[in-house]
Image (cartoon, rainbow, N blue to C red):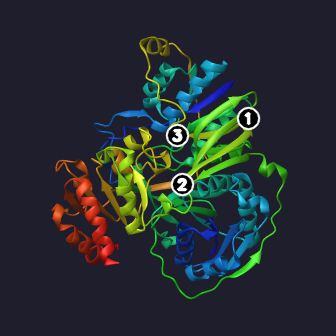
Amino acid sequence: MNILVFVESDEGKIKKSSQEAVAFGAAMGGTVTAIALGSIESAELENLGRFGATKVLHASDDRLSQGVIKAYTSVIAQAMEKIGADVLVLANSSLGNPVSAHISVKLDASLVSNVTELPDTSGGAFTVKRSIYTGKAFANVTLGKDKKILAIKKNAIDIKETDGKATVEKFDATLSDADFNVKITKTDKAEGDVLLPEAEIVVSGGRGMKGPENWNIIEDLAKALGAATGCSKPVSDMDWRPHHEHVGQTGVKVSPQLYVAVGISGAIQHLAGVNSSKYIVVINKDPEAPFFKAADYGVVGDAFEVVPKLTEAIKATK
Amino acid sequence: MKILVCITHVPDTTSRIAFTDNNTKFDTNGVQFIIGPYDDYALARAVELKEAQGGSVTVLNVGGAETEPTIRKALAIGADDAIRVNADPVDSLFVARQIAAVAEGKGYDLILMGRESIDFNGGMVHGMVGEILGIPALSPVMQLDVDGGKAKIAREIEGGKEYLELDMPFVAGCQEPIAEWKIPNMRGIMSARTKPLEVVEPASDEKGTQLKGFELPPPKGEIKMFEPDQVEELVKALKNEAKVL
């Protein structure tokens, strides 16, 4: 099996979710070539060997420093054809998802997103498990076309690093002006923070935090844990926190190793965004909060008292 | 301006998810169906644009006759007419092919839909429709303004937003806060009954995937509770038991 993996970078570093995509490709048992676009250091690309890539194609055209969907579609489709890829693997993301949808039509490939496990290829079929109903169930689906595209969900695989080193090869794709007819005029992005969908640990606050001025309590705990911060829908609706931090049915869906919910009652719409988390800790002063039913660990208590203590206790273990 | 809004007919967000027929069919027993919440944002924005700039809003749904009450609700909210492609929406590519076939050559300036359906969450149909029709597709769009033949949009990315400018026509997968949901008023509900709803047969039966069956996640184990003065114990459990620290 010839596998191409599209890897994304953030601030010059390959994203954790893309490292997982490479590891996923390698675990499928084929030859893994990665494709990276834009400006990324060679050392960072060679490092993809640690996750199972043999070779990295690097399309370094300056215009690709921005994630222009059509241009990315062109480059990745050309890379698939060049290496004769049977399967394209990538991480679910705001760039990966649209790009995979375009490529699936362009190259006549079967596409499945939110993949949570390695494919089952027994008996000549190619079946994958995907998350549906916002994490409340799974579907097993068979991909019928010769070419296949898998957009994988965070933590679909445990990464096992080796000491491999990938060879980096320059990839000159043919790009036309039409590939750039949608202009990105500005990007507003929180810098230096752990990105919410990428995070292994997420600390979220709800209405129980009483106001945006108290968010330092959430941020301190997140910092001690190396976590990203999130919030419930009412909190983003009231503009206490930006929309990209809203975790839930109509916001970001996360699947971290650990999700810590502070002062969030656990409406079913919020749970839909976090139910793929491996472990959930709930801190709430109301013992009847429905979130406790979905949690692994719980503390009934005042967030303003419990959270700073928890932050100190975590710092003490480091 | 001519706008096509594609809507899904999906279980309410509070629905209990269960399956029948040896885990091959969704159990609709006691489930209330709604316009997909993201599609509802797309529809609301389409109606706002029509009210501000003139034009028409057509609603499209791929589904069986059971989706007609949902389509009528969209008409009550302010769409002018509707098309139902008479087929089960079995797969992203299948749905994208139907939407593209309906839209082809009709001169829609905008094709709007939700960022994803809340049943299958694929989030792929808008991109596929864009590629089939050879026009841009953007998602998730949280701001959409139109002036002349040009549009300015904001798209959510990890950790922030991206602002874009492009020419119409294009496809957009929408999400909050692109518009406020609209609640149909009595006049809307009355007029929706007589608005045209055309039923067409599927134009293609091409699919990318085949469903084998469903599974529910394993039940959650017992919760372990700690007193507010036992946070050290909680940290120990996270470290030694869950092994996440």
- Residue closer to the observer: A19 or A302: A302
Q: CA distance from mark 2 to mark 1?
A: 27 Å
Q: Considering the numbered disc 1 on the image, is that residue within a helix, a strand or a loop? A: loop
Q: CA distance from mark 3 to mark 1?
A: 19 Å
Closest to the camera, between mark 2 and mark 1, is: 2
Residue topped by disc 2 = B159
Q: Amino acid at mark 1?
A: Met
Q: Residue at x 81, y 48 (%)?
A: A178
Chain letter for mark 3: B
Residue topped by disc 3 = B175
Give the mark, 3 or 1, whose residue is nearer the N terminus: 1
Q: Are circles 2 and 1 on residues that touch, CB within 8 Å?
A: no
Residue topped by disc 1 = B168
Q: Quadrant of the C terminus of chain A?
A: bottom left
Write down the quadrant of residue B138 in the picture: top right
Query: Are both tags, 3 and 2, on one chain?
Result: yes
Q: For the image shown, how many numbered marks are present on the structure?
A: 3
Point out residue A38 in the picture as x, y percentages from the top left corner.
72, 65
Chain letter for mark 1: B
Q: Is residue B218 left or right of residue B196?
A: left
